[in-house]
Image (cartoon, rainbow, N blue to C red):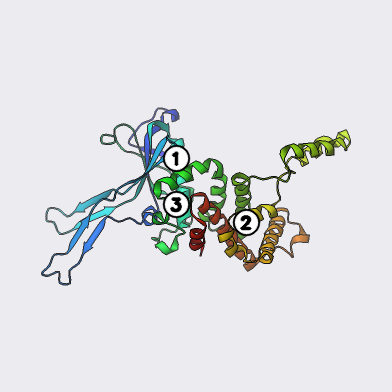
Amino acid sequence: NVVFVGENFQSPDDIKFERVFVEYLHLDAWAGVSGFELRIPDDYKTHPMEVAHTRPEPLTATVGGEYEVTLSFPATRKTSSPLLTEATITQRAVLAIRFPEKKPLEHLMDIAYRLQHLLSFGTRRSVYPVAVWGQTGPESEAERVVVNYRSLARRGADKKRLNPHEMLFGLGDLPEGFGPTVERWLERAEVLDPVYRLYLGTIYNPQSYIEQRFLNLVQALEVYHRRASPSSELKEEEHEKRKEEILEAVPDQHKAWLEEKLEYSNEPNLARRLKEVIRRYEKSAFSVTGDNSKDRGRFVYKVVTTRNYHTHFDKSKEVEAAQGEELYRITQKLKLLIEICLLGEIGFEAERIKDLIK
């Protein structure tokens, strides 16, 4: 599945690097940083046309005191030879993951995937690595080891260059800048990775059925609520007491079956989870789900009924389940809701989230 160019490894356990560098599709557009200055005079026959390039300063995030993630903007130049009639300067955007000692490539790529998720979230596009290479030893002397593999996110990816208005947010929108945002995103990934994957599954695979996208987003919101703001109907000790009383009241031959059924009985249902998520981000969520409680209640009911139908295919729920255009609309609202939650997780204030969602 992987080809390495520039190094020979004796076994999979030897595949380790101190640094991994990744160029992603749309990274330069998301960063929105240019080191070019172009001066075109009114009359370039008598006044020179000038193009200047100054390499932008790199940006660094220190994650948990363990490693660094750096966004840098290297440039390459190309000139015609021997007579100079053409000159090209190309600025690129590269993310580097740096550890003080060698780490397995798999660990480094896990971090790279999470950074890919952040970029896909910000651009609302399928972002994937277009170049990956590793290094070990002093950076000025280290040889580049190219890592070639096929990324699943390439499927259906839109390679057309993005404009800022097409994105949810870019580098310049980050409320606390590159470092704190990247650090928070990566540290929260330990808890929210399943949410990232469920939400981004709808972006990485845009050809999927609308029903599948709907179910992915509902599950993403359920998992987000469970992991970001866990709650239960009763305190744990009260719930255990209730379970014991119920189990004591049934015949022994049914106790094991009933105990299994009661395992998640203290978990809030989907309707409650949705209402609590909406309430948590009410300043921005109300504009998506409805300005009054009646509209919000109707939205929650429709989501729950539709989820139950597409999970169990109960014919009695088919008439009430959203179909066609209505299903598309509530799926779009669920997508906005999970985006609101993730924007809050990386530090955006309520008013700014509302503006971005608009």
The part of the image, by quadrant, that contains residue 298 is bottom right
Please tell me whether mark 3 sits on a helix, a strand or a loop: helix
* Residue 42 makes an appearance in the image: yes
* Residue 1 makes an appearance in the image: no
The residue depicted at 12 percent of the width and 67 percent of the height is 47
> Looking at numbered disc 2 in the image, what kind of residue is underneath it?
Arg
Pointer 1 or 3: first along the chain = 1
Please tell me whether mark 1 sits on a helix, a strand or a loop: helix
210 or 1, nearer to the observer: 210
Which class describes the residues within 10 Å of circle 2: few (<14), some (14-19), or many (20+)?
few
Residue 235 image position (x, y, % from top left) = 72, 41
Task: Give above or below for 2 relative to 222.
Answer: above
The residue depicted at 54 percent of the width and 44 percent of the height is 193
Tags 1 and 3 touching, CB below 8 Å: no
Q: Label 3 belongs to which residue?
A: 119
Which class describes the residues within 10 Å of circle 3: few (<14), some (14-19), or many (20+)?
many
Residue 341 image position (x, y, % from top left) = 55, 53
Callout in the foreground (1, 3) = 3
Q: Label 1 belongs to which residue?
A: 109
Tags 2 and 1 touching, CB below 8 Å: no
> Looking at numbered disc 1 in the image, what kind of residue is underneath it?
Met
Q: Is residue 78 left or right of residue 233?
A: left
Residue 293 image position (x, y, % from top left) = 67, 64
Query: CA gap, disc 1 to disc 3?
Result: 15 Å
Callout in the foreground (3, 2) = 2
Q: Label 2 belongs to which residue?
A: 279
Please tell me whether mark 2 sits on a helix, a strand or a loop: helix
Q: Is residue 215 left or right of residue 318?
A: left
For the image shown, how many numbered marks are present on the structure?
3
Callout in the foreground (2, 1) = 2
